[in-house]
Image: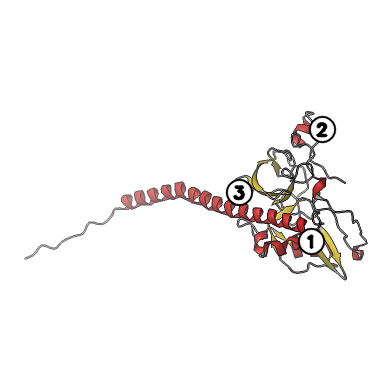
Amino acid sequence: MTALSRQRAFTLIELLVVIAIIAILAAILFPVFAQAREKARAASCLSNTKQIALAVQMYTQDYDETYAMNLYFVAPNVWFSFYDAHVPYVKNAEILQCPSARQEIDWPGMIQTLTGGALRAPGNFRFASYNGNYALFEDGNWGAPLGQNTAVSPIRESELQYPAETSAFYDGWLDVQFYSPIAPRHNEMTNCAYADGHAKSVRGRRNPNPTAPTDPIKGRKRDEWLVAGGPYGGSFELWGIVVNPNCNHDLRRAGQCSDPPRSLR
């Protein structure tokens, strides 16, 4: 008679040990994979902001060295935005979307909310992830239907003392009061396009004591993050025309300087 062969099975303890090892490896590797993926998205986002920076430069060359206004009223009921002004220069409206937050700003939806449906977007794009420096892109004609006309002259390139330090577009979001907070969505870094045509990353820091009201749409406070340094240091926005690159909101609050970024108007 031939002896029957028997295969040895895993014991419960051995299976639990294997599962535990796999769980430990996953806990170690998944954050690494997530961080690597975010670095790839950050690189793609920085490429977007560089293309937007070049679009700003091309726009100013076509329009007598002036920057776009942030809003133009087009009869009878359309708001044409500074986004719309630059879309023809990037060719692809998806350039306005960061891979880490493609639907951060629903521009037609925001106009619908702000105007109660009185005005609409022209339809050149829907979603954006980058906010604008509304001191560089001055207020245009907001339109008779709302009883508002705050038109002023656009900013000219010659008015900027420090175009390489003055922001144009950056990782951000828009609250219902039209503030433009930064969004350090790339490992606490915010990608920014500048008025001179270059782009770079700017570090953010969490604000330990945010005081702004909670935005009813986004459910967060606009001052949850602050710019960590540079001419906009201490602000929750990359907003303003830089008049002294060695002064910022942090230094001004500390009494060490008196010229943080501000509007020319």
Occupied quadrant, residue 105: bottom right
Residue type pointed to by label 3 = His
Q: Between disc 3 and disc 1, whose residue precedes?
A: 1
* Residue 186 tag number: 3
- In the rendered structure, which amino acid carries the disc numbered 1? Ser
Dot 3: within a 10 Å radius of its alpha carbon, few (fewer than 14), some, or many (20 or more) residues? many
The secondary element bearing badge 1 is classed as: strand
Q: Which residue does the image show at 41% across and 48% down from the upper left?
A: 25
Q: CA distance from mark 3 to mark 1?
A: 26 Å
Q: Which residue is mark 1?
A: 81
In this view of the protein, can residue 254 be seen by the observer?
Answer: yes
What secondary structure is found at the residue carrying circle 2?
A: loop
Q: Residues within 10 Å of mark 1 (few under 14, many from 20)?
A: many
Q: Nearer the viewer, residue 24 or 240?
A: 240
Image: 8 above or below 212: below
Q: Residues within 10 Å of mark 2 (few under 14, many from 20)?
A: some
Under circle 3, the secondary element is loop
Farthest-out residue, left: 1
Eye-nearest disc, 3 or 1: 1
Image disc number at residue 96: none
- Residue at point 79% right, 28% down? 255
Which residue is the site of mark 2?
Answer: 258
Quadrant in the rendering for residue 208: top right
* Residue 221 in sight here: no
- Which residue is located at x 28 percent, y 54 percent? 10
Q: Which percent across, then down, holds residue 206?
A: 67, 41
State the separation of the CA atoms marked 3 and 2.
Answer: 31 Å
